[in-house]
Amino acid sequence: MREKIIAIITSIIFAIFLISTTVKITLNFRPLYYFDIEYLKITEEVDMDKEEIKRNYDVLIDYLQPSYKGELEFPSLPMSEEGRIHFVDVKNIFIFFEYVMWITLFISFGGLIYLIIKNDYIVFKYTAIMLFAFPLILIIPFLINFNYVFTLFHKIAFTNDYWLFDPSTDPIILLLPERYFMHCALLMVVLVTIYSIILMLLYRYLIFRYVKRKGAE
């Protein structure tokens, strides 16, 4: 009973860790945006070429890194004070996920080591099931009304309405269309699904190896 409780708790923490890594991977997966510049025809929305758009985007992503300590200054775009405050808020969200990622890594690592020593591999199956449920829960509202989900997220995540950018004072919003964020969400869903499949395969392999070893004794 004790090991089952440890397995369930470890699975939850391990799942949170893996979901946190998808946030970090998605933030840093710049090829997705570079692809979207042409796919979403962003150059038609602003008087900028692809390279200039990439430079401004790269500055934003560099700024959002938890380790970055400087101020946000776009190479060729103005920014209002409200816009600056919003990006500080966004950066704080990524800092939060960074803390969550490292804390859950160390806690889940301890639980995994304990359970593996006990030859209790069910933790991988539990985690795989939790991760598989995560994209299912997300994908349905995304497909029904992504705009509503996107707006609801901002209302929950932020304590002000500075995320409602005016393109005349914060033209960066023209470089970040809503469909790009939908693609980011889909990337996270894909990553979580891959994690789930890998963990389920790992669970089956470990059980097979354990049964084979016990049969040889």
Image (cartoon, rainbow, N blue to C red):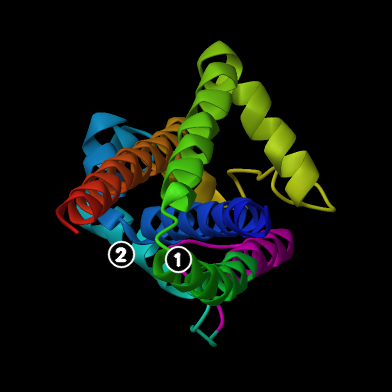
First-in-chain label (2 vs 1): 2
**Residue at the spot x=37%, y=36% of the render?**
193
Q: Position of residue 9 (x, y in %)?
A: 65, 56
Residue at 18% x, 49% y is: 212
Reading the image, the residue beneath label 1 is 118
Badge 1: few (under 14), some or many (20 or more) residues near its Cα, within 10 Å? few
Q: Main secondary structure of the magenta part?
A: helix
The residue drawn where x is 19% and y is 56% is: 213
The percent coordinates of residue 31 (x first, y second) are 23, 51
Residue 216 — which label?
A: none
Residue under label 2, please give it: 55
Q: Secondary structure at mark 1?
A: loop
For the C terminus, the image quarter is bottom left
Q: Magenta segment, which residues?
A: 71-95
Q: Horizontally, is 131 left or right of 71 in the view?
A: left
Up/down of 119 relative to 168, above or below: below
